Image (spheres, rainbow, N blue to C red):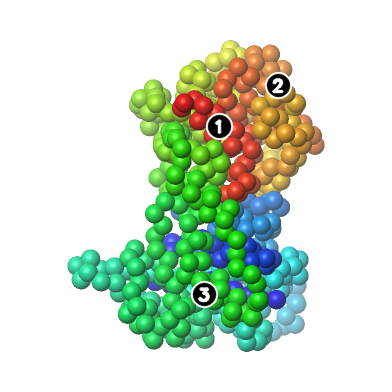
Amino acid sequence: MKYIFVTGGVVSSLGKGLTAASLGTLLELRGLRVVMQKFDPYLNVDPGTMNPYQHGEVYVLEDGAECDLDLGHYERFTNSRLTRLNNTTSGQIYEKVLAKERRGDYLGKTVQVIPHVTDEIKSRLHEITEKQPCDILITEIGGTTGDIEGLPFLEAIRQFSLEQGPGNCLFIHVTLIPYISAAGELKTKPTQQSIAKLREIGISPHILVCRTEHPLDADIRKKLSLHCNVTQEAVIEERDVAYTIYEVPLMLHSEKVDAIACRYLGLDTPPPDLSEWSKFVQQIIFPSRKARVGLVGKYTEHKDAYKSVKESLTHAAAASSLGVELIEIDSEQIETVGAEGLLKGLHGILVPGGFGSRGIEGKIAAARFARQHNIPYFGLCLGMQIAVIEFARNCANLTDAHSTEFLPQTPHPVISLIEEQRGIERKGGTMRLGSYVCRILRGTRAYLAYGQDEVTERHRHRYEFNNDYRETLKSAGLVLSGTNPEGDLVEIIELADHPFYVGVQFHPEFQSKPTRPHPLFHDFVQAVSNYAA
């Protein structure tokens, strides 16, 4: 059993998760079984209650765990099927330690960060490898070296590496090499300081991954090697990619990161076959045609709020050799300017999930514009509910139809709180979360996409299609093409007389892969391509 720990220094948002996931890709292509894990130092139990503007997307796993968006990178870049074990926060650790103290598990001892908190962190490393057998566990440590809240995690992995013995744990440090334009040169001092902080803790990285806008020349590599105590070949250049994040595994392989890691860990593997991955990247960079898709959301100012949606579009576009120009549109602006002014000229409209009443009428206007102008429309979670509200108002003569989330006293609650959610006051981890079965109606667009009677998709919501309106909306022409057999809940709606008008209550973006795009995203992009032709 081998372990790789990925830390970060100098500044946040360096792409540690992307680096870890890319290494996972390379090691899997060498024939190794890889499992990915994230340690997050924040005190929240999970990111489920965080504002998207602060945290970005909340990624949902098969077992219903709400977790960091980096786990989306892990699942997209590798074959790992992750669970709540794969994302550990300080909040979870302290919650577990305090529960043990209350039970008397520590036999009256003073409970301290060392050894009780660090032991609990280490137990997560042991537990995950017992339940998810693999050759290599890659663990990313969130935050930046020097942050107070991250110290227990760094101390825990230091202890853990000693317990595992030489040659079994590899430390990778991702750092920034800033370019000072006034001086016309790259600066290594911030990285030297970051490494010094790590070495104070007792960790000396074996590989230094340098985020940079400019190439690292031989002198810079030599300087970093000397001051950071890594070999020159282990000073890795990770430049900003020109086109897509999926270039990163190819870049790291060209720098021999996977070979260095395998050699240090004593793993004898064949070189990776990157032909399929390279082909996928080429399809992104050199599409045969282009189209414009509007993403109508309410968190468009934060680039990571719809991360999985954007990546799923990229996967599907590459498979169709289509270059998608994604236009992010604030739904509140539609309420001010009107749909025509912002949506005219688009070849597809996608409305993703979200919470709260802000910008809802703008989203409803976007759904109506797509329906009336035969523009391919794809609604995800809230986007499906928006489509139902719009259809009820304008096609089923339910003029005041709405969701009780936004208008509790609406006379026509076509979207309402499901029974199991009534009376729940706690916010964290109480939604309908994780994978549920969806039964597909044959002869529908959804069945055409999936090609099977039952599928499993991931959910994150509290409100549902109100079954009291099923017959009314069906008789008006709404097709209910997917339902959950357990609760008879509507999962997919569509219009038969439209090039592509589909809404899903779940989040298909959480199951799309670079070389295996999600079927619904694939067919949406095909419809976009046809519309643009």
Q: Which residue is mark 1?
A: 526
Q: Which residue is mark 2?
A: 470
**Camera sees residue 91:** no
Q: Residue 87: which quarter of the image?
A: bottom right
Image depth: mark 3 or mark 2 in front: 3
The numbered mark at residue 172 is 3
Confirm or deny contact between disc 3 and disc 2 (CB under 8 A). no
At horizontal 68% and vertical 29% (from top left) the residue drawn is: 448
At horizontal 71% and vertical 68% (from top left) the residue drawn is: 134
Q: Residue 460: which quarter of the image?
A: top right
Instruction: Residue type at mark 3: give it.
Output: Ile
In the depicted structure, whether residue 229 falls above or below residue 405: below
Instruction: Residue type at mark 1: give it.
Output: Gln
Give how far across and how far down residue 275 sits, in percent.
57, 56
Q: Residue 124: which quarter of the image?
A: bottom right
Q: Report the side of 307 relative to 176 (left or right).
A: right
